Amino acid sequence: MNVLIALQGESWEQLGLRAYQQSTESLVMGLRNANRDIARAMNGFVFLGGERIVIPTITQSKKITIEVAPWER
């Protein structure tokens, strides 16, 4: 697991973008679950700055390719 230092005024979504280069609801919930003490202590969803945020490792799901049937080409 990695650790990032939250920036003043940064939101969970912005932190997700910085950590994973994307921000989805499931990623934000994963960040919040990995940092429950910080999430509970916050007033709102914006960091004061300087908080050490644990960045959990995410597993990539397998990509499913759906091909077009030969008669539909």
Image (tube, rainbow, N blue to C red):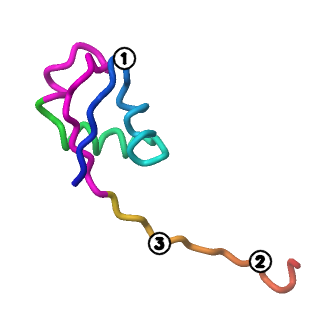
User: Which one is in front, 68 or 63?
Assistant: 63
User: Which one is in front, 62 or 53?
Assistant: 53
Q: Amino acid at mark 1?
A: Gly
Query: Quadrant location of residue 3?
Result: top left
Distance, label 2 to label 3, CA atoms, is 19 Å
Q: Amino acid at mark 2?
A: Val
The mark nearer the N terminus, 2 or 3, is: 3
User: Which one is in front, 1 or 71?
Assistant: 1
Report whether 57 appears left or right of 15. Answer: left
The residue that label 2 is drawn on is 68
Distance, label 1 to label 2, CA atoms, is 47 Å
Q: Residues within 10 Å of mark 1 (few under 14, many from 20)?
A: few
The residue that label 1 is drawn on is 9
| Residue sitting farthest toward the bottom | 70
| Residue sitting farthest toward the top | 43
Q: Position of residue 7 (x, y in %)?
A: 33, 24
Q: Residues within 10 Å of mark 2 (few under 14, many from 20)?
A: few
Give the extent of the magenta segment. Answer: 38-57
User: Which one is in front, 30 or 72?
Assistant: 30
Please give the label number shown on residue 62.
3
Q: Is residue 19 magenta?
A: no
The mark nearer the N terminus, 1 or 2, is: 1
Q: Nearer the viewer, mark 2 or mark 3?
A: 3
Q: Quadrant of the C terminus?
A: bottom right
> Mark 3: which secondary structure?
loop
